[in-house]
C-alpha cells in the first residue's frame, strides 16, 4: 500500500475556529475595558451586609476571607452560630 494523503481542510477549520475564538475574546476584552473606562470607578469597592443599626461593611479582602472561612466550615459540617 502506498501512502495515504490526508485532507488539509480539518487543519484549516481548526485554525479558523481558534482565530474566531481569539478575535471574540479580544473584542470582549476591549468592550469591557472601554465600558469600564467610560463609566469610571465609583469609589472604593466594598461589601455591605445587614441594614439599619445592624449594618456591617467589609473590604473585598475581608469579604473574600469570610467566604473562605464559611466554605471550609460548611465542608466540615459546621453550622453558623445563631
Image (spheres, grey):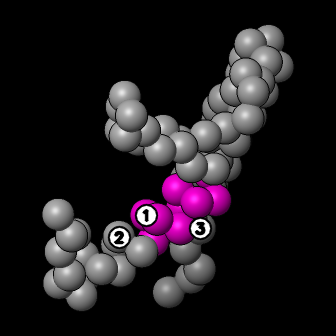
Q: Which residue is mark 2?
A: 70
Reply yes or no: does residue 80 show up in magenta.
no
The disc, 3 or 2, on the residue closer to the chain's N-terminal end is: 3
Residue 5 shows which numbered tag?
Answer: 3
Whether the residues at callouts 3 and 2 have beta carbons within 8 Å, the answer is: no
Q: Which residue is mark 1?
A: 67
Mark 2 secondary-structure assignment: helix
Q: Is residue 19 above or below residue 80?
A: above
Query: Label 1 neighbourhood size at 10 Å, few (<14), some (14-19), many (20+)?
Result: few
Q: From the viewer's side, name the closer residue of 40 and 10.
A: 40
In this view of the protein, can residue 12 be seen by the observer? no
Q: Is residue 39 above or below residue 62?
A: above
Image spot of residue 4 (x, y percent): 55, 74
Front tag of 3 and 1: 1
Q: Is residue 28 left or right of residue 51?
A: right
What's the distance in space between the residues labelled 3 and 2, CA to CA? 59 Å
Q: Which residues are magenta?
A: 60-68
Image-quadrant location for residue 75: bottom left
Whether the residues at callouts 2 and 1 have beta carbons within 8 Å, the answer is: yes
Q: Is residue 16 left or right of residue 55?
A: right
Mark 3 secondary-structure assignment: loop
Mark 1 secondary-structure assignment: helix
Query: Label 2 neighbourhood size at 10 Å, few (<14), some (14-19), many (20+)?
Result: some
Residue lying at 70% horizontally and 26% vertically, measured from the top left: 32
The C terminus appears in which quarter of the rendering? bottom left
Query: Label 3 neighbourhood size at 10 Å, few (<14), some (14-19), many (20+)?
Result: few
Front tag of 3 and 2: 2
Amino acid at each position: 500500500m502506498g501512502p495515504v494523503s490526508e485532507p488539509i481542510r480539518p487543519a484549516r477549520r481548526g485554525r479558523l475556529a481558534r482565530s474566531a475564538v481569539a478575535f471574540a475574546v479580544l473584542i470582549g476584552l476591549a468592550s469591557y475595558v472601554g465600558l469600564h473606562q467610560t463609566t469610571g470607578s465609583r469609589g472604593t469597592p466594598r461589601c455591605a451586609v445587614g441594614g439599619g443599626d445592624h449594618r456591617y461593611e467589609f473590604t473585598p479582602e475581608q469579604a473574600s476571607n469570610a467566604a473562605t472561612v464559611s466554605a471550609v466550615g460548611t465542608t466540615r459540617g459546621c453550622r453558623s452560630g445563631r
